[in-house]
């Protein structure tokens, strides 16, 4: 059985990409769902929050 030919983008993603899933329950986390639904770039928004947290942690250690 032959492998399907991968594009360069697929090979790069297979080697370097990590993906995370975040389950949210509408009964207890509707505020989180509403906020994520209100932003156009969910991944960018989450990454920005994490980077801000990393910076804040660095500042408290100094």
Image: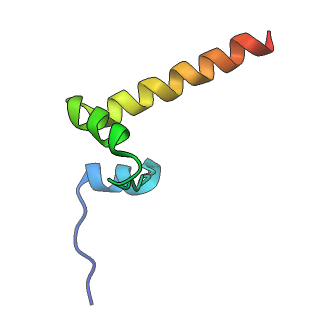
Q: Quadrant of the N terminus?
A: bottom left
**Which residue corresponds to the image point at 27% horizontal and 49% vertical from the top-left?**
9
Give the residue drawn at x 27%, y 51%. Answer: 8
* Residue located at (23% from left, 37% from top): 37
In terms of image quadrants, where is residue 42?
top left
Pick out the residue farthest to the front. 27
**Where's residue 52, x and y in %?**
53, 19
Up-down relation of residue 55 to residue 23 (above or below): above
Q: Nearer the viewer, residue 62 or 1?
A: 62
* On screen, residue 37 above or below 15: above
Question: Furthest residue to the bottom?
Answer: 1
Q: Nearer the viewer, residue 28 or 55?
A: 28
From this view, report whether residue 56 is shown above or below residue 10: above
Q: Residue at x 63, y 15 (%)?
A: 56
Residue 30 located left or right of residue 56: left
Q: Is residue 34 left or right of residue 25?
A: left
Q: Nearer the viewer, residue 17 or 38?
A: 38
Among the 4 quarters of the image, the one containing residue 61: top right
In the picture, the quarter occupied by the C terminus is: top right
Q: Between residues 21 and 11, which one lies in front from this camera angle?
A: 21
Q: How is the image coloured?
A: rainbow
x, y percent for residue 30? 33, 44
In percent of width and height, residue 19 lies at: 42, 52
Please count the marks in the image. 0
């Amino acid at each position: 059985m032959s492998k399907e030919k991968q594009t360069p983008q697929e090979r790069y993603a297979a080697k370097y990409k990590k993906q995370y899933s975040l389950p949210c329950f509408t009964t207890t986390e509707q505020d989180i769902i509403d906020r994520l639904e209100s932003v156009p770039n969910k991944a960018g928004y989450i990454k920005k929050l994490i980077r801000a947290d990393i910076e804040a942690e660095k500042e408290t250690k100094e």
